[in-house]
Image (cartoon, rainbow, N blue to C red):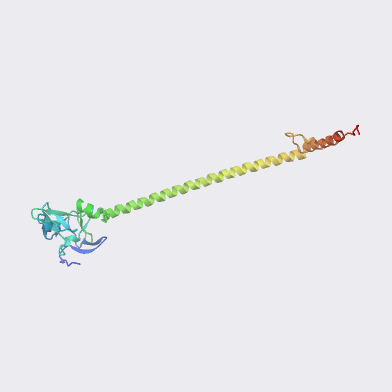
């Protein structure tokens, strides 16, 4: 890690995305924190215009700072969508300063917004990892989890209600069948025990039935001699 004079209010340290710049002393809102510097690239020179890296800071149509040099400590400052600092560009002086836009406490990471072009080119494709975006993602995940739990509980309540309904219907049916069976057996008892002369019920009383069958047999027995072959006269 680069050595930074101890009178400076920042140090390079580990951040969520690798290295970052952190406050070591309170930094008042509006204070210049550090200069973002490096060789100036002239877009009119072909070989300079062809240089491509993540640390290019465009000042205007013509001039760009190549901040990829090691001495440029400001290149450690990470992007944030809700930063505590900003890049203060002085195109005529061809200088850029990082300035606090909030009071920054010791230990806090220093961030500034890299701008729309950088965001679209480098951050959007991989998903911005700044604290604000992580917080947003975390909240969304928590909300999704809550929604899933809510739907699951709802489905379980519904299933339980359905099961209770089925059990109730089942019990009702059993009661009905039981009552019917009891009624039938009581009726049978009445017919067998107390009904005189075996009264016909729908033409099929137990006693009546056997009587009909018995008389039918008698009838058949009486008829038999009639249907027997008569002695032939012409023998
Ligand atoms: Zn972000």
Question: Disc count in the image?
Answer: 0
- Whether residue 82 is visible here, answered yes or no, is no
Residue 176 visible at all: yes
Q: Which image quarter: residue 46?
A: bottom left
Q: Residue at x 65, y 43 (%)?
A: 178
**Residue at the extreme front:** 235
Q: Position of residue 54 (x, y in %)?
A: 19, 58
Residue 158 vs residue 221: left or right?
A: left
Left/right of residue 201 with respect to residue 176 in the rendered view: right
Q: Position of residue 98 (x, y in %)?
A: 16, 57
Instruction: Write down the quadrant of residue 122 in the picture.
Output: bottom left
Rendered-image quadrant of the N terminus: bottom left
Instruction: Give coordinates of residue 198: x percent, y percent.
Output: 78, 36
Q: Quadrant of residue 53?
A: bottom left
Position of 225 relative to 66 (above/below): above
Query: Which residue shows up at 15% across the image and 56% down it?
Result: 57
Foreground of the two, 216 or 68 = 216
Judging depth in this view, the residue of 219 and 211 nearest the camera is: 219
Between 85 and 166, the one lying in front of the other is 166
Residues 86 and 49: in front is 49
Residue 129 lies, in percent from the top left, at 27, 56
Q: Residue furthest top?
A: 233
Q: Quadrant of the C terminus?
A: top right
Question: What residue is at 35 percent from the left and 52 percent from the top?
Answer: 142
- Position of 93 compared to 141: left or right? left
């Amino acid at each position: 890690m680069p050595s930074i004079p101890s009178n400076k209010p920042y140090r390079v340290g580990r951040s969520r995305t690798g290295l970052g710049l952190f406050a070591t002393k309170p930094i008042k809102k509006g204070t210049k924190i550090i200069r973002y510097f490096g060789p100036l690239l002239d877009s009119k020179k072909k070989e300079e215009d062809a240089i491509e890296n993540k640390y290019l800071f465009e000042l205007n149509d013509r001039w760009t700072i190549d901040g990829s040099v090691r001495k440029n400590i400001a290149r450690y400052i990470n992007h944030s969508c809700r930063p505590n600092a900003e890049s203060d560009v002085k195109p005529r002086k061809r200088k850029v300063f990082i300035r606090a836009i909030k009071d920054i406490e010791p230990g806090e990471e220093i961030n500034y917004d890299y701008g729309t072009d950088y965001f679209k080119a480098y951050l959007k494709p991989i998903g911005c990892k700044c604290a604000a975006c992580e917080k947003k993602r975390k909240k969304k995940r928590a909300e999704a989890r809550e929604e899933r739990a809510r739907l699951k509980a709802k489905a379980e309540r519904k299933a339980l209600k359905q099961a209770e309904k089925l059990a109730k219907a089942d019990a009702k049916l059993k009661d009905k069948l039981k009552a019917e069976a009891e009624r039938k057996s009581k009726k049978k008892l009445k017919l067998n025990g107390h009904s005189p002369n075996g009264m016909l019920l729908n033409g099929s009383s137990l006693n009546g039935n056997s009587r009909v069958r018995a008389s039918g047999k008698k009838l058949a027995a009486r008829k038999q001699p009639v249907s027997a072959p008569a002695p032939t006269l012409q023998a």
